[in-house]
Amino acid sequence: MKHTQADHNLDHMVQASDRKMNLTIAVITGCMLLMLVGMLFDVPGLIFYPVPALFLIFLLMGGINLEGRLSKVLPGLISYAVIFGGLFIAMGLLQDDTTLVLGLPISTAILVYLIWPFTTLTSGALYAWVYQTWLSKSELDGPRSADEQHQSLPR
């Protein structure tokens, strides 16, 4: 069977995608192993600090569209992850501080009063933004009329 240039290009794209996925799996596995070591040997930093990296990886994976691209939503997702990561790192750094905030140690207060509401109240809006900006639009579907686009909006 004769291979065309299109077949060669497709094979190259699949290999590149496989490499990216293998790298992603390796980073996730590395983070999980660090966290496991931290739990087994009571090293809180090894438990806390991989979480923002995992958060970013999963955000980026969720923002990939049907064509396997991420570019339009990348700045927004990275900004969201930087805010989350900054709060999470502050929580980890202040874990030994005895200051109380509304009756809780400051590290717990950061989690309960900042991280939890931040992710709970904004993650739906982030998803809606990513969906409207990027995920609902696919060049694989071909051009769509305004009526088709309006009908595909979630209600």
Image (spheres, rainbow, N blue to C red):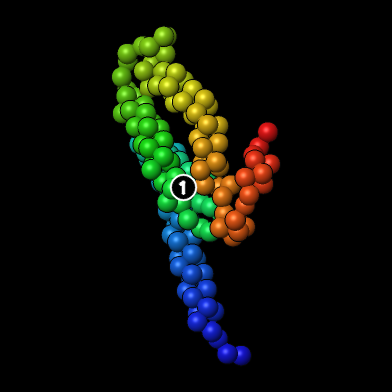
The residue lying furthest to the bottom in this view is 1
Residue at 66% in and 44% down: 147
- Quadrant holding the C terminus: top right
- Quadrant holding the N terminus: bottom right
The residue lying furthest to the top in this view is 102
Depth check: give the residue in front, 5 or 77.
5
Residue 47 seen: no
Residue at 40% in and 21% down: 110
Which element type, helix, strand or loop, lies under badge 1?
Answer: helix
Q: Residues within 10 Å of mark 1 (few under 14, many from 20)?
A: some
Depth check: give the residue in front, 89 or 122.
122
105 versus 132 height, above or below? above
Depth check: give the residue in front, 60 or 149.
149
41 versus 72 height, above or below? above
Residue at 46% in and 52% down: 70
Depth check: give the residue in front, 8 or 148.
148
Q: Position of residue 139 (x, y in %)?
A: 56, 58
Residue at 52% in and 31% down: 125
| Residue wearing tag 1 | 60
Q: Position of residue 91 (x, y in %)?
A: 36, 27
Query: On the image, which quarter does residue 77 sit in?
Result: top left
7 versus 88 height, above or below? below
Residue 133 seen: yes
Query: On the image, which quarter does residue 143 sit in?
Result: bottom right
Q: Position of residue 111 (x, y in %)?
A: 44, 24
**Amino acid at the residue labelled 1:** Leu
The residue lying furthest to the front in this view is 146
Total labels: the figure holds 1
Left or right position of 155 against 123: right
Q: Position of residue 37 (x, y in %)?
A: 42, 44
Left or right position of 35 against 135: left
